[in-house]
Image (spheres, coloured by chain):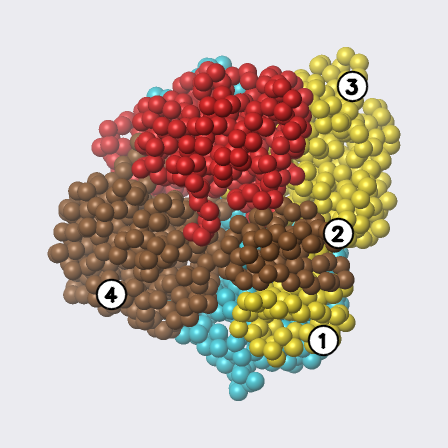
Chain colours: A yellow, B cyan, C brown, D red
Amino acid sequence: MIAVMSANCTEEEIQAVQNHIAQRGFSSQISRGVERVVVGVLGQPYPGLQDELEVMSGVAEVIRVSAPYKLASRKFHPENTVVHVGNVAIGGNELVVMAGPCAVESEEQLMATAKAVKAAGARILRGGAFKPRSSPYAFRGLGEAGLKLLAQARKETGLPVITEVMDTEDVDLVARYTDILQIGARNMQNFTLLDVVGKVRKPVMLKRGLSATYQEWLLAAEYILAGGNSEVILCERGIRTFETYTRNTMDTAAIPVVHRLSHLPIIADPSHGTGKWHLVTPMALASVAAGADGLMLEVHPTPDTAWSDGAQSLTFENFAKMMDMVRAIAPAVGKVVAPPVGQGARA
Amino acid sequence: MIAVMSANCTEEEIQAVQNHIAQRGFSSQISRGVERVVVGVLGQPYPGLQDELEVMSGVAEVIRVSAPYKLASRKFHPENTVVHVGNVAIGGNELVVMAGPCAVESEEQLMATAKAVKAAGARILRGGAFKPRSSPYAFRGLGEAGLKLLAQARKETGLPVITEVMDTEDVDLVARYTDILQIGARNMQNFTLLDVVGKVRKPVMLKRGLSATYQEWLLAAEYILAGGNSEVILCERGIRTFETYTRNTMDTAAIPVVHRLSHLPIIADPSHGTGKWHLVTPMALASVAAGADGLMLEVHPTPDTAWSDGAQSLTFENFAKMMDMVRAIAPAVGKVVAPPVGQGARA
Amino acid sequence: MIAVMSANCTEEEIQAVQNHIAQRGFSSQISRGVERVVVGVLGQPYPGLQDELEVMSGVAEVIRVSAPYKLASRKFHPENTVVHVGNVAIGGNELVVMAGPCAVESEEQLMATAKAVKAAGARILRGGAFKPRSSPYAFRGLGEAGLKLLAQARKETGLPVITEVMDTEDVDLVARYTDILQIGARNMQNFTLLDVVGKVRKPVMLKRGLSATYQEWLLAAEYILAGGNSEVILCERGIRTFETYTRNTMDTAAIPVVHRLSHLPIIADPSHGTGKWHLVTPMALASVAAGADGLMLEVHPTPDTAWSDGAQSLTFENFAKMMDMVRAIAPAVGKVVAPPVGQGARA
Amino acid sequence: MIAVMSANCTEEEIQAVQNHIAQRGFSSQISRGVERVVVGVLGQPYPGLQDELEVMSGVAEVIRVSAPYKLASRKFHPENTVVHVGNVAIGGNELVVMAGPCAVESEEQLMATAKAVKAAGARILRGGAFKPRSSPYAFRGLGEAGLKLLAQARKETGLPVITEVMDTEDVDLVARYTDILQIGARNMQNFTLLDVVGKVRKPVMLKRGLSATYQEWLLAAEYILAGGNSEVILCERGIRTFETYTRNTMDTAAIPVVHRLSHLPIIADPSHGTGKWHLVTPMALASVAAGADGLMLEVHPTPDTAWSDGAQSLTFENFAKMMDMVRAIAPAVGKVVAPPVGQGARA
């Protein structure tokens, strides 16, 4: 941490800054430039020290020069983290595709989708039982009945499942049924929920908040890691910008950025990232080319009757076509993708 | 709701859209323009119908023409809502100032601040016992000990108190101590938390999310109202934009916009809205001039030693000066402000 | 300028950075922390040096610690700049209101508006003769015929005029007719245009770009000042954010921020800042309370037949009412406003 | 265009809206829903009519249902536009790579770079002679001397060249030397410049503005097309968001969106899109996978001594490696890429 003093600061102000740093238990070091004096804090100060110094008389700016997250940082953990779910490894050489309906609606809908996505090469089944909805009047998920259907689909297809948990009180319930806990974008800074899933011994997929910086996202992951759960997967799902044609603006660059800053695997969700089914395949391919460790996609037997997010869901046929294109691109960036299984993929 | 058909849609596609609307239990009406055919849905369709129609063949766009919130809308509730807390009325002629430290740190800090803000004319005491922090390593509040100090400060000063609740599990605890429950910006779309505070019989102050549109904000209020709690106060606290000099960009226009769209009172928080203490007074005055029903401000005995948000906290003296300016401006927009009490205001 | 070295940088890399700085003609100084080494550049380096250092091996980050603008900075020019236009002084104690139609449409429209805004207390007449329009098919202004009407209105009312110039080739023409040259938001970084108006000896009003940071805006002003024209007025007119209910998000905090960073006067344009006439008065009042040196407002005899921007234009009556409210608020922040003239204000 | 009337509008207000539409020369048609009345405008109204109707009494909202651009729209021009420059075709099966230094600095720098990028498979040489810079004190390009060096490089390598034009007065000069005129992001809405390049008979590459919507961007293209110049290439180069780790947020989805809305070719500039050289290759690959018709890249012999944008420039070696990866991915999306030429690619 560095305190840049004002151009016209006094020696007393510089001394006061040094005294404050000393009172907080750190050493300091002064560097006098022609225009400015800079006071450096030695050691590993806590984040609040920045605020404390910023308000002191004579201080122009306080700059943090090392990342405020440690456990999530590649600096202290250079090798990639690989998260294992059943026989699937996320963060290794395989590009892992997670697919399924936005919301679990019925046994028929879920089983048909699970079989179709497995046939096309998906390795994990997604499906929402608890749905965050901006309106209180919208369909909010089947709840535990939906979780039971997911467990049944896992049994029938062998695919591990991922589903969202929205509240600390539901964590135990959801964890009993699912293989991966999903934290949604709107809960990325629900810090009590992050604390609780940090205590669970199941992998957690943490979606990026709609207006979260990379640093805030990695700090949210740090909450989970600091709780003792080292199996965190990040998921880029688009950020909010001024552009309204797409539901969100998918920040594809987040993929190589996260790979540089952190050792955690990162996957991409082009369904939420674009909000329009006809943009899903090109953005899935873009994500693979940018180095994603996986994809999460919404697939529905009949998107035009889906209870939620139909506009961004792929049909079985379009999903299978997309998987073929993903398989064509992945090797160029050193990834392998599961082959289609049997003949069901184009059913 | 209106479905605008594509320029080259077929009669079959138009018919299919009408059939789908009929299956969902609504009537429809066709309007044929020179370039486009528009199918209108009669009645009050559920939000999901928009998604369903958007994916149908031949449909170019689906537009919702009435607001998706009802209880929060001024259309169905033309007169202002006034929220009563003790002898304070929020949303009436009085401009109500809520002030206090960001975080409750100690008895001395809280009591000194409570007395100073009361002396200067504040009507409600704020103070955080549970603090959302982007880093897991930052100070996260005193918890119940902080709530007890707030109750003690209320007893000593007579000021009602407001404090944040971050988790469904804490709602009962916090509601036992506080007069107003605050939902923070990061929890604006924590829908289970909104559901729970909708069942409480205490006023709720709902801060705007960092990237929440007016509609999403009012829909979040609708969750609370739909739960049966009609005492909701909105709070503009700045949104996230590309500008980084200020902590957030305070959207002052939210004040007249909310007054037009909704009957709920709206207050402004220039401390979080700017993040810099020297911008707090001008933005407090701007908010009053724009018609705010109240202000929320961070005040600290010694901002440069505050455990959080010191950079945006006012000293007692600056707060008292600001209150004098607020009192000078408020009458021009038809508001009254409590006078200073005794001689402690400038202590 | 400070180069923060990577945690694991080598002594050779530190030496290379020092050598590069020396080759560019500057001295450097090293500060060794526990975690990081920081190399400070002494003197006043050119902006490009930041880029050069950032790409060097071993460099983690380069931070600029002094503002890149000089002539626009309050640091080197502590007293306020006051721009004189005829008998009007912008940046002093008077809050100066500029008002008139978005576009000059006809003699009748312009003269009626000029008289009405003068009667209500406006001190400068605005009106567009060259209009930037996002569509090539929209009305683009009367050109020189419009300038002649503005000159005629000035003669009849005595009000100085302000009008936009969009192209280097038109600067001489527009400068012959107008008292203040306006640079629009879309041209804020049209650097050749800034260079040219820097050579003119007429005041320039520089609107903030739709996505311009404070620093970029002040750097754009620096272009004009560096050309030798010291009479620059800044104008906040709203920035682009995710919110679409308003045409732009008016950044009221820009007013106190600019007053702190710069000595140049700043005015506010709530017509473009909101895009809705019913938000113009509250945001005009908010701007005054925040310390604006003036206001720019769109006024039209019959907004519902205006050729452009009717939705955000005030009628004569609403403008006069707004002026009364401005006069009620301005004294609280130490400003005076011209009184209404004669009885025409409410015509 | 559709005017949605307020819930409580009167028959007189509906009639007034119809009268206004009739006065403007259009027919209208009324559709009465249970909650709302909608008045449709028949024919092709001018954009300003929306503003006119929006301010009328009783009108809640006016919605445009057809795109305001025509010449740029795929609806009226279903087949792809292919722009020919020498023997290079942009918008066809070939993925065309444009590469070179940000700014032309010297003969040695330009010739070395031109040969290296040609050897690696680039088909067009880029280089700036007039540079837009946010600071007036930064290097602003060699001007005509730079144009002459570009012409010389074309002669020596056979590569067509592209360079930026910043001002209407320079268009003739730049057009004499270059094969493609580039309009930079900051000039995307410099409408007089768009008018002038619309009269030139050379291809124009139009970069997206930092905060331009897809519609505004296509309307800017419409200016050029409406001037008679049908050879327009679009270039996505990142938009401005709240994220500051990257220089811009590259909106990869713009590529499939533009392909859907328009027939014009679109290329991607990951150098400006990211601002960091280590993100350029992954984002170049992502752009190819998303369907880009080409790439524009900054390459420099020694990025750490570049006079501008060194941080985002590739070395010759990294550029050649990137080209190999581009060649591996392009076939999966149906594109071919020029092979490396001779042995110079890795020099």
Q: Are marks 2 and 1 on the same chain?
A: no
Q: Quadrant of residue D39?
A: top left
Contact (Cβ within 8 Å) of mark 1 with mark 4: no
Q: Label 2 amino acid? A: Thr
Q: Chain of mark 4?
A: C
Q: Residue at x 59, y 61 (%)?
A: C27
Q: Pick the residue in front: D244 or A167.
A: D244
Q: Is residue C316 left or right of residue D151?
A: left
- The percent coordinates of residue D47 (x first, y second) are 33, 34
Q: Is residue D169 left or right of residue B105?
A: left
**CA distance for labels 4 and 2:** 62 Å
Q: Residue at x 53, y 87 (%)?
A: B343
Q: Is residue C61 left or right of residue C193?
A: right
What residue is disc 4 on? Answer: C88
What residue is disc 1 on? Answer: B106
Contact (Cβ within 8 Å) of mark 2 with mark 1: no
Q: Secondary structure at mark 3?
A: loop
